[in-house]
Amino acid sequence: MSLIVLTHTFATLFMVGVIWLVQIVHYPLYHHIHAQSFPDYEVQHVNKITLVVAPVMFIEATTALILVVRAPANFPLWARLLGLVLVIVIWGATLALNVPQHNQLSYQFDRAVLDQMIRANWIRTLAWSARGALVLWTLGNLIGGQF
């Protein structure tokens, strides 16, 4: 079980770093890409970022589900459920907001869509940040035996 907890912690913290990098650096720099080359750049971005984040997101979601069903005895149910709810929020925002916006931008640059995507991405940024705090709190308490 400790391997699941550590894998889950790694996946979540990895994604916290990625999402903040994307939110603060990467997406705002989209404004500086020439409109003619933007669709090609966007397609390349989606293809390459998917290779990096998709496996980690699947690992995070799978381990979150495993931890809800089967976790160390001293791992509170509320923390496991909150973590899973946040994963659902992240995946929901990704599929309902970010993927359609990326799809639109892969056909044609649209400043309004880009600005919507950057604003909508705060949902994922804040949800992953909350997950990061939760997994660090959980790991600290599991190590320290505080539950």
Image (tube, rainbow, N blue to C red):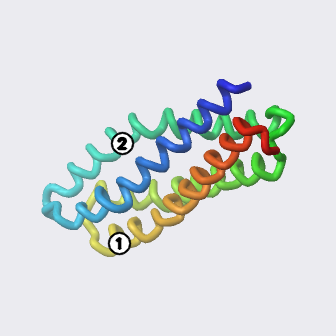
Task: Locate residue 104: give its quadrant.
Answer: bottom left
Q: What element does badge 2 sit on?
A: helix
* Residue at (33% x, 67% y) in the render: 114
- Residue 65: x and y in percent read 73, 38
Looking at the rendered structure, the kind of residue marked 1 is Asp
Crowding at label 2, few (<14), some or many (≥20) Cα neighbours within 10 Å? few
Q: Is residue 92 visible?
A: no
Task: Locate residue 70: give its quadrant.
Answer: top right
Q: CA distance from mark 2 to mark 1?
A: 19 Å
122, 117: nearer the viewer = 122
- Residue 123: x and y in percent read 53, 64
Looking at the rendered structure, the kind of residue marked 2 is Ile
In the depicted structure, whether residue 126 falls above or below residue 64: below
- Whether residue 34 sits left or right of residue 43 in the image: it is left
Q: Which residue is mark 1?
A: 115
113, 30: nearer the viewer = 30
Q: Which residue is mark 2?
A: 49
Chain-order first, disc 2 or disc 1: 2
Query: Are circles 2 and 1 on residues that touch, CB within 8 Å?
Result: no
Crowding at label 1, few (<14), some or many (≥20) Cα neighbours within 10 Å? some
Q: Is residue 79 visible?
A: yes
Q: What element does badge 1 sit on?
A: helix
